[in-house]
């Protein structure tokens, strides 16, 4: 017999299960082996040396591994980071062992188990005032509608209600799942707008959108609770806070009181930038905890790494490259990179020539964990996301 060897890579657990099913493996066998076929890598920060050595011994005993600083065994460093590597089965066995240990290892076991659960979460049902938003199968397209005179890409184009409604109608016809209405430019250097002016700009448009397109969710792009409250009363059904609750302490309370979905965007000028993804995740953990403490339901949260906010081109590219790391939260992820400056800097192109750069960023995001993608060019990006989903699935996206 001539054997034939092939390499298979599985981007999601479902692909691994499907291949075993095609091989004729029994359902019980598939369930058992999935834990062996899913491989995970976790970076654990600031391990005490006793904890690190215990982790090393326990992982080796079950066939896994953890990479530590080379001087950990000598003991002349105060602490070490560790790269934990193993199959799901091995990591769960490790967690069972760690629960019997000391040096905060039982807490680490609980954190790892929660992370595994979150990483395998791939579908969400977000409750809206009317109906719900189903996320996870393929990214939803959020169309950008700026009712502003000075937004970096489309400032001044949709300042009157007729042009704004025409633009929204076109985006919906082109495939937009959500319309994101904003009344203040958040481009670098833009002048802040008072809530009264922001409300004056967005309310007439939101009212008409809600009346004319009752089945299309409207999000209000604001960091002011006063504006958000007025927009929700007018017909909006999501809050998109690019400040991540850091500019207005009442925003989380409003989301809790109204029960609407809350998008928490990363926007932190204090970040250390030693590792942008670690900074983002640590900051978002604080903001999520704040939202939950205010009474926002966990199942109503969406996170956004905040491409372009307090970040340079290199950092934005790192965020895109490592976007899937945000799945550790177990929340849907929104990505907004459309036409942004970092694309222009990479391609050396102005705003009007960033369509293909945006397309590359959107295709990557759609393949690596984005559940909502915020864009200007709805028609083009809807087709791109549909094609990307079909390729990722290995068949027609339903």
Image: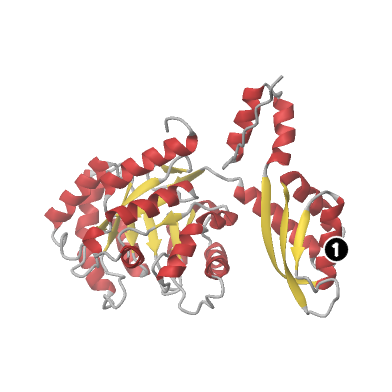
Q: Is residue 238 above or below residue 379?
A: below
Whether residue 216 can be seen here: yes
Judged from this view, the residue extending furthest toward the front is 2
- Residue at 82%, 61% (x, y): give it: 55
Look at 41% across and 56% down and name the residue there. 335
Quadrant placement of the C terminus? top left
Residue 77 picture quarter: bottom right
Looking at the image, residue 287 sits to the left or right of residue 70; the answer is: left
Observer-nearest residue: 228 or 271?
271
Q: Closest to the observer: 314 or 139?
A: 314
Q: Is residue 19 left or right of residue 392?
A: right
- The secondary element bearing badge 1 is classed as helix
Residue 113, x across and y down, in percent:
71, 52
Question: On the rendered structure, is 313 left or right of 383?
Answer: right
Residue sitting nearer the eye, 74 or 371: 74
Instruction: Please indicate whether residue 79 sits to the left or right of residue 74 in the image.
Output: left
Residue wearing tag 1: 54
Whether 7 is drawn above or below 156: the answer is above
Taking the spot 40% from the left edge, 69% from the top edge, the residue there is 313
Question: Is residue 236 visible in this depiction of the protein?
Answer: no
Give the x, y percent position of residue 146. 24, 61
Is 180 located above or below residue 274 in the figure? above
């Amino acid at each position: 017999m001539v054997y034939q060897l092939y390499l298979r890579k599985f981007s999601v657990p479902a692909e691994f299960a499907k291949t075993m099913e095609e091989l004729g493996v029994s359902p019980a066998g598939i369930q058992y082996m999935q834990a062996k076929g899913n491989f995970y890598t976790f970076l654990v920060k600031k391990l005490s040396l006793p904890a690190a050595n215990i982790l090393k011994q326990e992982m080796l005993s079950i066939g896994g591994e953890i990479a530590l600083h080379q001087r950990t065994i000598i003991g002349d460093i105060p602490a070490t980071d560790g790269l934990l590597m193993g199959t799901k089965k091995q990591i769960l066995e490790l967690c069972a062992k760690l629960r019997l240990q000391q040096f905060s290892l039982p807490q680490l076991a609980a954190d790892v188990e929660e992370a595994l659960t979150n990483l395998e979460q791939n579908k969400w049902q977000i409750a809206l005032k009317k109906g719900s938003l189903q996320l996870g199968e393929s990214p939803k397209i959020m169309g950008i509608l700026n009712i502003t005179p000075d937004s970096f890409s489309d400032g001044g184009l949709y300042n009157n209600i007729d042009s704004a409604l025409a633009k929204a109608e076109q985006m919906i016809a082109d495939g937009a799942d959500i319309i994101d209405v904003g009344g203040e430019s958040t481009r670098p250097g833009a002048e802040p707008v008072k809530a009264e002016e922001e409300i004056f700009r967005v309310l007439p448009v939101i009212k008409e959108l809600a009346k004319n397109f009752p089945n299309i969710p409207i999000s209000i792009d604001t960091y002011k609770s006063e504006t958000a409250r007025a927009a929700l009363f007018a017909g909006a059904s999501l809050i998109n806070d690019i400040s991540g609750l850091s500019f207005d302490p009442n925003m989380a309370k409003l989301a809790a009181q109204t029960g609407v979905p809350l998008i928490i965007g990363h926007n932190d000028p204090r970040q250390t930038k030693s590792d942008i993804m670690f900074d983002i995740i640590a900051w978002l953990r604080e903001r999520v905890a704040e939202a939950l403490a205010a009474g926002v339901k966990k199942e109503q949260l969406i996170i956004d790494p905040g491409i372009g906010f307090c970040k340079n081109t290199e950092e934005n590219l790192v965020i895109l490259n490592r976007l899937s790391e945000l799945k550790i939260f177990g929340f849907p992820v929104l990505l907004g990179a459309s036409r942004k400056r970092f694309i222009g800097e990479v391609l050396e192109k102005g705003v009007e020539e960033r369509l293909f750069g945006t397309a590359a960023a959107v295709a990557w995001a759609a393949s690596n964990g984005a559940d909502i993608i915020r864009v200007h060019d709805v028609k083009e990006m809807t087709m791109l996301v549909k094609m990307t989903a079909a390729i990722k699935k290995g068949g027609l996206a339903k």
